[in-house]
Image (cartoon, rainbow, N blue to C red):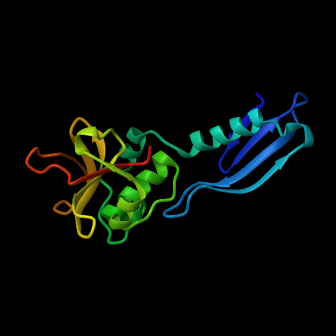
Amino acid sequence: MPFKIEPGRVVHFNDFDQADAEILFEPPLAEKPVQITASNFARKTTGARIQRTMLQMLMEDICERLTVVLDDVVGVPYLKDGQSIEAGFDTGGLIQYIFNKIAGVGFPHEISEQMKTVTQFNASEAIPGDLLVWGSSLLPTTAGIYIGGGRYVTVDVFTEKVTVKTISQKWLPDFVGAIR
């Protein structure tokens, strides 16, 4: 196998099973995007194909499927300013965590700042992984991530847990945005 990925590291091996290219990285966390911390390429491994493959492997390693992330977050308790599975989430922290995991990007914590970071469009165009926001850009009232089938994941203020809810036809999101 010429390529290998480990936590925080992608390696390419030559025909003699010696590492001749390496990229070290830190996955996205909160508002900090993925960071390449070091790279080392032997003289003959500067080819674009090897580098492109290594970067693709890095992104595939840090980006998880939305269904996997949902399994991890549903039921996690509410915590003001929370942004981790271990401690809990508020709505902005949950959205930040999900975008970190599924898109591999650093993402703001505040919902009003999240709205500025994504491309905006109509609710009828939403696909799984899109940001849904109710309220206005100046005063968002609630938000969640669309998961398909008219449902979204959010922190429910009544149960104080991360919950999957159904979008009411009487109460459609005022805003939808995505990183695509």
Name above or below for residue 142 compared with residue 119.
below
Q: Is residue 87 shown to the viewer in this render? A: no
Instruction: Note whether 92 is above or below 102 in the view shown.
Output: below
Q: Residue at x 52, y 44 (%)?
A: 63
- Please state if 149 lies on the left or on the right of 106 as rendered: left
Tell me where residue 151 sits by quadrant. Answer: top left
Disc tally is 0
**For the point 40% across and 66% down, which residue is it?**
109
> Which quarter of the figure is the N terminus placed in?
top right
Q: Image quarter for residue 41?
A: top right
Counting from the top left corner in percent of width and height, residue 106 is at 51, 59
Pick out the residue farthest to the left: 170
Residue 160 percent across, percent down from the top left: 23, 62
Q: Residue at x 38, y 61 (%)?
A: 116
Left or right of 156 in this view: 91: right
Q: Can residue 111 be seen in this snapshot?
A: yes
Point out the image quarter for the C terminus.
top left
Position of residue 30 measured from the top left corner of the image (x, y, whole percent): 49, 63
| Quarter location, residue 89 | bottom left
Q: Is 133 or 149 nearer to us in this picture?
A: 133
User: Residue 170: x and y, percent?
Assistant: 7, 48
